[in-house]
Amino acid sequence: MKDLRAELARAPRAVTSYVGGGFVATHGAPIPVIDPSTRAVVATLHEADAAEVDRAVAAASAAFETGPWARASVADRQKVLMDIHAAILDHADELAALETLNTGIPLRQTRGMHVPRAAQNFRFFAEFINQQGGDVYTQEPGYLSLVTYDPIGVCALIGPWNMPLGLTAMKMAGALAFGNTCVVKPSEITPLTLARLFQILHDRAILPDGVINLVNGSGAVTGAALSGHPDIDMVSFTGGTETGARILTALARGIKGGAMELGGKSASIIFADADMGRAVDGAMLGSFMNNGQMCLAGSRIFVHRSVADRVIDEFATRTKALRIGDPFDPETEIGPMINAAQLDRVQSYVASGLAEGAKLLAGGKPCEGSGGGFYLEPTVMRAPSNALAICQEEIFAPFATFQVFDDEDEVIARANDSRFGLVGYVWTQELERAMRVSGRLRTGTVLVNTPILRDLRTGFGGVRQSGLGREGAKGSRAMFTEMKSTIIALQPPALPRLGI
Ligand code: NAD
């Protein structure tokens, strides 16, 4: 643990922008960057204003129009993506420590999962683009019709605070793989790992100048300037649903598209025939991984009446036993919440749940943890109906609700009674039931008998207000390319001759 803390000595103390191949001298309005496990200020972010965003977009635009990247061969792009993969893995300990410092996510998760996954995104797309082609249609005699997938141009990549490196790396890998240039905007709450990654990539001179640019700052200033910029070609956004709507409004003015990975309130349905040990283990992970701050948290748990008391009792007992504390401690299972606002928000949901008739089974209060951070006792409530705010709104915290159901149709209707539709979890040993229920859940992904699992070959994304578009493989291709049709007359029939 000591060694990893020592790695943090290299953490950026002043976070600025990276434009056209160089870091920008600090001058923007300062925003403190906090370690949520101690509330200490660990760095200062200097906000990029509209003029700085303009310079970053201009650099990305110039690199796209006149630089080598958009025209690079697949082999050259593959090499760059694999070099980024190696760079991340070479700095995995340091990046994981930084991610933990800035997010409070336990180190065993950032080191064991998030950083390797960030690297894997680049490797995946390096392999994927080698298998990609276009389409050829020859059905029309005398004509050849081609469909190609051209890079879309300058991509604005805007990320959230809950998994800053992994989620934004996914966007960068996809955008670069298809020959685009980009401007990345991390959350102002958690800018440290991406700032460090840009430094690492700069030191290794992996990419031509201007292909990747970084702007840091708040959503209202830097984010709005970027998403409303006339010279970006698309936005790939991960964050809250309301922010996504704001960005789509800005894009609509320029008749541009955006891929939106938004909020969720995912149902986890435990049928009476489930492997109960696995279902409870999975539901615990689905609610409490990443300190419960996960878009795909399966925190709205439905359990069949015949097994409800046993399952809820075990879940609540184990929730009370979760090890809360210093995220750098390898034994820690739950670190701090991201900030004071989030801590207050969770408590207001406990109060609203109680007022609407829910029963508090575990947690619900701030607790000491270690170091004076934003610690919260993981919370479990039993809700009498799906209409309660705690069952309808995304709380984004270690906060699970239980509801009891009697039959399949009823639970599907209640699971689908949500404005969100990110993931549905189904726990059953009956294959036909699993297929039946999966088919009826209105979500972008269904996971059967497994908690959180991402397979990059499949698309990830939401329906309803959980988003637009899919990330991964062909979903990312659709997001980061323009489909172009080229129709060539080879031995065409004579044309009617107008005006003769
Ligand atoms: P947020 O919407 O507050 O912020 C996300 C990003 O948008 C930040 O970088 C922020 O600065 C920026 N932003 C804010 N206003 C903006 C504007 N007007 N224009 C452009 N950018 C703007 O979200 P958050 O609190 O950082 O993240 C939590 C949310 O993200 C949750 O709702 C969660 O479900 C969602 N999320 C979704 C996925 C997914 O894959 N579907 C994954 C992770 C998180």
Image (cartoon, rainbow, N blue to C red):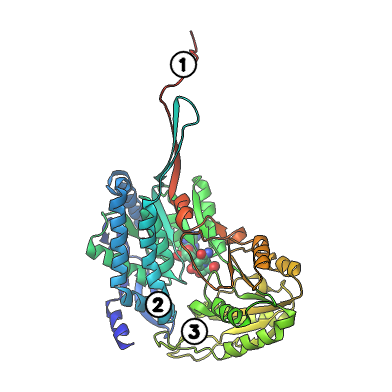
Question: Which image quarter: residue 206?
Answer: bottom left
Percent of width and height locating residue 420: 62, 64
* Dot 3 beta carbon under 8 Å from ligand 1: no
Say which of 31 and 427 sits in front: 427
179 w.r.t. 496: above or below: below
Q: Earlier in the sequence, mark 1 or mark 2?
A: 2
* Quadrant containing the N terminus in the rendered view: bottom left
Which residue does the image show at 73% across and 65% down from the upper left? 413
Q: Earlier in the sequence, mark 1 or mark 3?
A: 3
Marks 1, 3: nearer the viewer: 1
- What type is the residue that disc 1 sits on? Ala
Please give the residue where the numbered disc 3 appears in the rendered image: 334
Spatial separation of the CA atoms under disc 3 and disc 2: 15 Å
The circle drawn on residue 112 is 2
Q: Is residue 188 visible?
A: no
The circle drawn on residue 494 is 1
Percent of width and height locating residue 85: 32, 65
